[in-house]
Image (spheres, helix red, strand yellow):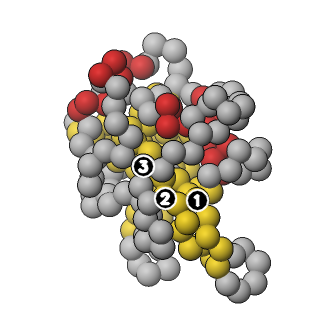
Amino acid sequence: MKLTSLNTNAGAVTGFNIEEQGPTGTFVGRLVDIKDDFKVEVKNWEGDGTTLKDVTRFLFCYKADGRFWLVQSWQMTQSPSEKSALFKMLRDMKGEAPVFDGNYDYLDEVGQTCQLSVASKTSKLGRNYNYISSIAPLLEGLEDQAPALDEVEIPGGRNVPLDPEDTI
């Protein structure tokens, strides 16, 4: 797994700033950006304290009600472990397990189409937000229904530069 730092926001709040929440349901989607953050302070699951971890979030776009909407993944630790959220997200999106053999870079997945199920939730602080409740490979023949990469505006600018061939 290649982990190349595109952002180094040590200790900063991670994620994309999505101001408007789109409709919920199941949609044709496309992975449009990935945001890696390194040495982020993360609460320990067991007990008190924090740990510094390298994390990532995936940003997806889907079309509903005649416009584009964005939804992001949970913050995931950059881990090739089969038990990690990152591994499971990639496996479920592609329909096959990623092979972290030193040549695979998950940043290359930007542009991948998928089927997204989007749900809504209210945080403990009262903030309403959408999240990805499930993700699956897209059925053949539906790729043209996914938003094109070059049509999507990323809040705060793109993190993963687009290859000119990837503007599908």
Which circle marks residue 37 in the picture? 2
- Say which residue label 3 marks: 6
Query: The disc labelled 2 sits on which kind of residue?
Result: Asp
Q: Nearer the viewer, residue 139 or 72?
A: 72
- Give the CA separation, mark 3 to mark 2: 8 Å
Secondary structure at badge 1 equals strand
Residue 69 position in % (x across, y down): 31, 45
Q: Quadrant of residue 106?
A: top right
Residue contact at pointers 1 and 3, CB within 8 angstroms: no
Q: CA distance from mark 2 to mark 1?
A: 6 Å
**Residue type (three-letter) at the residue carrying disc 3:** Leu
User: Mark number for residue 54?
Assistant: 1
Q: Residues within 10 Å of mark 1 (few under 14, many from 20)?
A: many
Q: Is residue 121 visible?
A: yes
Q: Left or right of 69: which side holds 101?
A: right
Q: Earlier in the sequence, mark 2 or mark 1?
A: 2
In the picture, the quarter occupied by the C terminus is: top left
Q: Residue 79: where, in percent of width, then height?
A: 68, 50
